[in-house]
Amino acid sequence: MDGPALLLSLRLAAWTLVVLLPLAIVVSRWLAWSRFRGKAWVEGALALPLVLPPTVLGYYLLVSFGAGSPLGDGYRALTGHPLAFSFEGLVLASVIFNIPFAVQPAQRAFESIPADVRHAAACCGLGRLETFVRIELPLAWPGIVSAIVLTFAHTLGEFGVVLMVGGSIPGETRTVAISIYDRVQAMDSAGAGMMSLVLLVITLAAMGVVHATARKPHV
Amino acid sequence: MRTLLAALLAALLAAFFAATPARGAEPPVVAAASDLRFAVEEVAAGFERERGSRVRVTLGSSGNFRHQIAAGAPFEIFMSADEEYVAALHKEGRTLDGGVLYAIGRIVLFAPHGSAVTPDADMASLAAAVREGRVDRIAIANPEHAPYGRAAREALQRRGLWEALKGRLVLGENVSQAAQFASSGGAQAGLFAYSLALSPAVAQRGRYVLLPDTLHAPLRQRMALLAGAGPIAREFYAYLQQPAARAIFRRHGFALPGE
């Protein structure tokens, strides 16, 4: 059982949520209620990480993070550390490959809020922020919970992208999924089996939460 | 549901605030070729015991590491299974110097228990099994970027088996994956590093024979300190060349330079 790897995965999932969730709420709310030319393309682009092979995503991220790329060199100039093969690079990659897992459930939830409700809130004299906090967020809550849980579980499970941009550094980029792969290669089936079981249980619990909240939306 | 959620969020926040260790305080990372899996872990353990410092080891194929280092991976020592990769990185200014030859690798022909192949140095049994169609899968490391995969390919070519086997190869991403494929019984035979065949996890799952080193170009394994290596990495690098570390390499089936 690779404890540091599990802790690292949890830390990665937490950071991913901290960065991604606010962005996803803003973007999904905007997508839910606005119509514009090319909206289908924007939605399609945001859904890409769902269907794109992780190696394709990993390749592009590696190219854009690495030495010689504006992003990689800029980050190094700013912080003195490379972005590729670092925890920060992993967080950025994780935010990108989780976009559809966070945006789509939240968008469905915002779409399901009737326009009348929002208009009524405005008529009652609620400001935009107040409407958002007191009306929209509670109504969209089940979708946002789904977004949180799916992003969390998907981050723990992601393998291909993490392997390509991470480089399997213990304590920094060797997540639990990578560690399982490593244990199998070390012919340590006890270790691999134990960690696989932990991931299975966590993921099952996550899916349970998603389905439980989806069934009884609370107002 | 709300309490469950609150608990989940609390756990998240705890993970979020889990102290991120300051950079520079973390042990240096050693990128080591997969054939070193068991040997380098033993050397690192000895280093920690004797010197009280830790290194972190990441294992993979030398070719992948060569590209990761060129892309700026924060490794401090590169232990390659092929000296060409070290030379290329040296030319690009990524290493501190030309490095040191630390071991010479050998390959084995391995067959898991119950396989139609009996390992022999001539690979006669393998040739016969291939002819008679009793072998579907042979594991080697990917010759594109794994030095042990190249050595395996050369050995099969020398024995005139390459063409017949080409369609039956399963390629490991690195040599230890090739060993895992063969020892798990997924493939009926495998050609991989002697150092891995000697590990109990592999040895107990089949039989193997050390192949003559005339069958392939010598696997001259070179290591180097990488640009930006810190004091602990330098100490470990020196430790790797001490008699204690050399004895470990010898025990894991490596020939040592200068012996």
Image (cartoon, coloured by chain):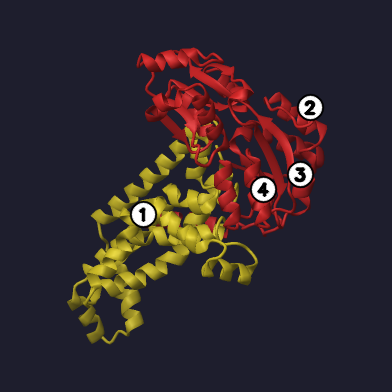
Chain colours: A yellow, B red
What is the tally of numbered marks visible in this picture?
A: 4
**CA gap, disc 4 and disc 2:** 23 Å
Could you tell me the amino acid type at mark 3? Answer: Tyr
- Answer with left or right where residue B53 lies relative to residue A6: right
**CA gap, disc 2 and disc 3:** 20 Å
Specify few, some or many for label 3: CA neighbours under 10 Å numbering under 14, 14-19, or 20 or more.
many
Specify few, some or many for label 1: CA neighbours under 10 Å numbering under 14, 14-19, or 20 or more.
many
Could you tell me the amino acid type at mark 4? Answer: Ala
**CA gap, disc 4 and disc 1:** 46 Å
What residue does disc 3 label? B237
Residue B59 pos. (x, y %): 59, 41
Q: Are marks 4 and 1 on the same chain?
A: no
Q: Which comes sooner in the sequence, label 2 or label 3?
A: 3
Q: From the viewer's side, name the closer residue of B80 and A132.
A: B80
Could you tell me the amino acid type at mark 2? Answer: Glu
Does the rendering let one see residue B206?
Answer: yes
Q: Which comes sooner in the sequence, label 4 or label 3?
A: 4
Q: Which comes sooner in the sequence, label 4 or label 2?
A: 4
Looking at the rendered structure, the secondary structure element under dot 3 is helix
Could you tell me the amino acid type at mark 1? Answer: Leu
What residue does disc 1 label? A150
What residue does disc 2 label? B259
